[in-house]
Structures are given as structure tokens and as C-alpha cells.
Amino acid sequence: MKKLVYLIAIIGLASCQQQTQQNKEDEQKLTIQGEAQGTTYSIVYYPKSDTITKHEVDSILADIDLSLSTWEPASLISTLNNSDSTEIVFEDYNGYFTDMVRYSREVYNVTEGAFDPTVGPLVNAWGFGFKNRDEITPEKIDSLMQYVGLSYDNIRLTRFDDRNTIDPKRILVKAKKGIQFDFNAIAQGYSVDVLGNYFDLKNVDSYLIEVGGEMKAKGTKPSGVLWKVGIDKPVENAEERKLSAIVEVKNEAVATSGNYRKFYVKDGEKYAHTLDPKTGYPVKHNLLSATVLADECWKADAFATAFMVMGTERAIKFLESHKDLGLEVYLISAAENESYETYITESLKKKIEELSE
């Protein structure tokens, strides 16, 4: 009996200590939330000394919009897209546009064009951009496909003066003036990275940054507990969020792309918002969502989009032949009787928990 009482006392003491530690951790935690890029953002972090204000975060996101947002008429990308010239000299002070072209080309090359940020004219024609939907015909798509492709033959971006690497001036050379950029499939992930770099400069070594569902985690909570990220169940028009899985992350980014929320129906046929750059048409396969973990959020974001273009079988084959990329992936595909099938890369199985129906 004495041993039992002693054991209960130990358990009670441990429970009190855990609660005290949790309370202390909650007191240290700071949160910044707001709206940006047509969506919301949320940041949780544990500062060592100086705190970071919402104004600082909003200013960084506003600068990114002024460079990369197609919804902002005065942005750099809008200026370059709307230019009548095929050779444009411009200044890229913060390097955001240059980064987007360089990173996009990396993914474009390795995925053989499955990821392509020059699909802007197609996005607008299908009604997923900022213009009204065009009347879609095979002739219309064929006429737009001449502007699609991130190859060096179509697009070159060089420094204005190679002797001065500090000079922010660049020269954009387009094969045709109708070529346009749309970085929406990578820009939010990149925004997370930019914010992460800022928090790194402020010596914050424990944070979870989220913009529009794309996330990046650094370190652990002060108690040593890993950050946990939920992966949505691909349910159309769901009134409340339902999770398919929970994954533990540390010093890595997470991004999810899916077709179950953004689509439209015309003449009884559903059109997904993911466009295949090779055909010009929305993809048709059973892959509902792709979640990617990578060292940088731009990379996770871009590859998640590429896998949604490929579909389940092509994506799995790609992953098996490109293990050097270090990607961890969770795919959810539609199966019979409104059920789901999942694919998880081997290394991810150790830190993911799939939830029951």
C-alpha cells in the first residue's frame, strides 16, 4: 500500500512539474497573425531577447507583394508581364524576382516542365487568375501554348553588368512579348522562407511560420517538444476542417497542394485549378492532394504543385528516381466508394500519424 501511495505521489509530482513547465512555455510564446497575399498568416515563436512586431512582418510581406503579386497592378511582375518589349531592363533591389526565376527553373528542369510559372495566360483563360474566364476552345489553347515554357530559348534573365555583382539591375529577355509569369504556386512558400530568414537574423531559433497553409518550423519548443502540423483531409466544401494526418517537423518546411477546393463546374464537368503546362488543360487523375516536406518552403511548395500535375503514379516514379532531392511526400488519392488511398515516402513514415475516419 505504501509503495502504491509513493508511486501515486511521484506521478502527481511529475504531472505538476509538466504543468508548470507548460505554463512557463505558454508565457514565453509569442504569436503574430494577420492577412496578406489574399490569405492569412500565423507565426508562433519563442524569442531569446528582442521581440518581432506585426509591423515588421507586414512590411516584409508587402515588399514581396510589390515584387511578385500578379494581383498588384504596380508590382514588378505585373510591370514585366504587361511590357510590350521583349528585352526589359529593370531593378530587382531585394532579389525576390530573380530568386523566383532561378528556383522555378530548377524545379522546371528536374520535373521536365511539370512545374512551370509561365502558365499565366492559361491560368487567366481558364478563369483561375485575375481575369474573367475565356470561352475555351482547342484553338484558344493552341494559341496560348506558344507563350508557355521556362526554357532558356523562351526566357533569359541576366545581370545588367556582370562586372558588378551588387548592381540590382537585370535584363529580362523574352522570346515573345505575350510570355507572362505566375509565381502563385511557389511564392507563398518563398514568403515563408523570407520571413524565416528574417527571424533567423533576429536570433530566433524556435518558430513555426505559416502563410496560406505553407509552413516552416525551426528548432523545438522550449520543452523539447517537436512542432506538429496537421494535413487536411481532401473534402470538398467541408464546413469544418478535418485532418487526414499529423506530422512532426523540425528544421524543415511543409507545403500542400490540392484540387479539392479550387475548381469550377461547366456543363456538368469539373475542371481542376491545376493546369498541365504540357497540354494547356486542367489535369484529370485521382490525386487529390500532395504534401511535401523539404529544407526550404519554396521547394516544398513548387514540388507539391508539380506532383499535382503528374498524378499519383508519375509522382511516385519521380520520387523513386530522384531520392537525391531529399523530399518527403504524403499523397492522398481518390479510391473506390469515396474512400482514399495514401502513399508515404519511407522516411516520412517515422514522423507521421495517419488519423482514422
Image (cartoon, helix red, strand yellow):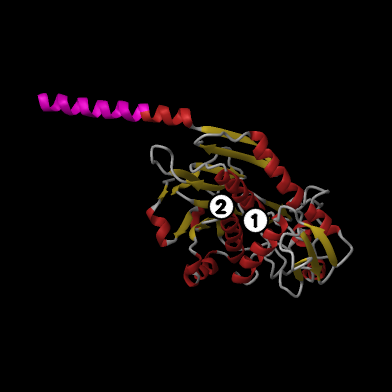
- Report the magenta stretch's main SS: helix
| As drawn, 43 above or below 161 | above
Give me the residue at 76% from left, 69% from top: 155
Q: Nearer the viewer, residue 107 or 54?
A: 54
Residue 231 visible in the shown view: no
**Image spot of residue 203 (x, y percent):** 53, 42
Spot the residue most to the left.
1
Query: What is the secondary structure assignment of the residue under circle 1?
Result: loop
The three-letter amino acid code for the residue at tag 1 is Ile
Residue 255's label in the rendered image is 2
Task: Mark 1: give few (<14), some (14-19) or many (20+) Cα within 10 Å.
Answer: many
**Label pair 2/1, CB-CB below 8 angstroms:** no
The residue that disc 1 covers is: 186
**Image spot of residue 84 (x, y percent):** 89, 63
Q: Where does the magenta region start and end?
A: 1-20
Task: Mark 2: give few (<14), some (14-19) or many (20+) Cα within 10 Å.
Answer: many
The three-letter amino acid code for the residue at tag 2 is Ala
Reply yes or no: does residue 146 show up in magenta. no
Query: What is the secondary structure assignment of the residue under circle 2?
Result: strand
Distance Cα–Cα, label 2 vs label 1: 10 Å
**Image spot of residue 125 (x, y percent):** 79, 59
